[in-house]
């Protein structure tokens, strides 16, 4: 592969909807109430995108250093473990991506005040501690909880805040929705890697509670997201519009069915792509609903 292809692979484009859709939907919600600010929205989008890429680079580096990425790995090839990128180069790229994210984040101070510095620092710390430190979150069953927080509540609430200047019940509901759907991307990886994770002492929730738990959680997140969207539209006075996201449940459960059918092996890699596609679909349906309200 070319260097560009290698770095695109390391950025893990199939995971990026988890960074993009919370900002996109929160900005659409701000637009709905007349508070949309295109520059603030752009800064949030770039910060979220670069922070996610940095987290992916860090995961590539620290999973290699921690012995998680072994020859038995079933997921897509990792740049460091495959020998395409030297460890020190990947670590340097991680800090570059984080630095660029912070540059865009600084611009948000003029919209959200100096509290945005604390929010940005929390995101940067999470991006690092997810894969490293004395207690890596991804290795001790904490990934699911922190994904809901940092891919749901944090990006949605503060994207909305820097544009509207306050929080609303609808923003809180949307934060929960985006967080729940982000978990599905994590489940797609952890379900596939359950055996190798167990061998390397990486205790994801699926390692701890089993594949049955993973499938149940996957099903629950989709249903809960649709129900919460209905409540969100109800709070805006248009309950019937909440039904617009329910078509998402068809591809959602088809993906779950496919995951259960395959059960193990490299063929499960396509579940990640399908989960990301479903996430995008839900976000587009939600925004379409806002246009119709």
Image: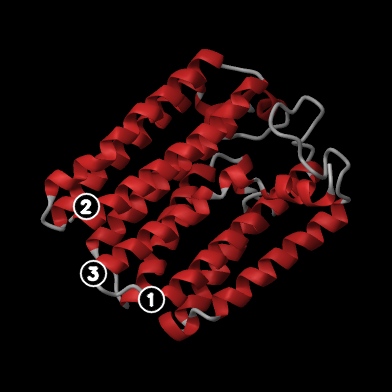
> Which residue is located at x 71 percent, y 52 percent?
57
Regarding mark 2 in the picture, which secondary structure is present there? helix
Q: Position of 80 compared to 277: left or right?
A: right
Mark toward the viewer: 2 or 3? 3
Image quarter where the N terminus lies is top right
Q: Position of 103 compared to 285: left or right?
A: right
Mark toward the viewer: 2 or 1? 1
Q: CA distance from mark 3 to mark 1?
A: 11 Å
Residue picked out by circle 3 = 33
Location of residue 252 by image quarter:
top left
| Earlier sequence position, callout 2 versus callout 3 | 3
Is the C-beta separation of discs 2 and 1 under 8 Å?
no
Q: Position of 265 compared to 260: left or right?
A: right
Q: CA distance from mark 2 to mark 3?
A: 14 Å
**Residue 28: horizontal and vertical position, in percent?**
33, 62
> Which residue is located at x 80 percent, y 31 percent?
70
Above or below, comparing residue 190 to residue 240 in the picture: above
> Which residue is located at x 64 percent, y 28 percent?
193
Q: Residue furthest top?
A: 261
**Residue 145: horizontal and vertical position, in percent?**
46, 46
Numbered mark located on residue 37 in the image: 1
Location of residue 221 by image quarter:
top left
> Which residue is located at x 47 percent, y 41 percent?
183
Numbered mark located on residue 232 in the image: 2
Regarding mark 3 in the picture, which secondary structure is present there? loop
Residue count near mark 1 (Cα–Cα under 10 Å), binned few <14, some 14–19, many ≥20: some
Image quarter where the C terminus lies is bottom left
**Residue 286: horizontal and vertical position, in percent?**
30, 49
| Earlier sequence position, callout 2 versus callout 1 | 1
Q: CA distance from mark 2 to mark 1?
A: 22 Å
Regarding mark 1 in the picture, which secondary structure is present there? loop
């Amino acid at each position: 592969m070319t260097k560009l292809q290698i770095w695109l692979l390391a950025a893990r484009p199939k995971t990026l909807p988890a960074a993009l859709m919370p900002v996109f939907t929160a900005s659409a919600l701000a637009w709905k109430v007349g508070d949309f600010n295109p520059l603030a929205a752009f800064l949030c989008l770039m910060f979220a995108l670069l922070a996610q890429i940095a987290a992916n680079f860090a995961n590539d580096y620290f999973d290699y250093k921690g012995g998680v990425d072994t020859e038995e790995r079933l997921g897509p090839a990792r740049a460091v473990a495959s020998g395409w990128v030297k460890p020190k180069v990947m670590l340097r790229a991680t800090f570059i991506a984080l630095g660029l994210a912070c540059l865009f984040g600084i611009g948000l101070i003029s919209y959200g005040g100096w509290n945005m510095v604390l929010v940005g620092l929390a995101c940067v710390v999470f991006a690092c501690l997810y894969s490293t430190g004395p207690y890596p979150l991804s290795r001790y069953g904490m990934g699911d909880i922190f994904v809901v927080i940092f891919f749901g509540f944090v990006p949605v609430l503060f994207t909305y805040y820097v544009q509207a200047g306050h929080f609303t019940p609808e923003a809180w509901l949307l934060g929960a929705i985006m967080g729940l759907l982000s978990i599905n991307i994590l489940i797609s990886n952890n379900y596939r890697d359950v055996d190798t994770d167990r061998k390397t002492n990486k205790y994801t929730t699926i390692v701890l509670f089993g594949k049955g738990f993973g499938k149940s959680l996957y099903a629950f997140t989709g249903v809960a997201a649709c129900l919460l969207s209905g409540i969100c539209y109800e709070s805006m006075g248009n309950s019937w519009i909440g039904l617009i996201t329910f078509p998402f449940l068809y591809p959602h459960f088809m993906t779950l069915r496919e995951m259960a059918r395959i059960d193990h092996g490299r063929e499960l890699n396509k579940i990640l792509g399908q989960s990301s596609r479903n996430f995008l679909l839900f976000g587009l349906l939600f925004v379409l609903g806002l246009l119709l309200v």
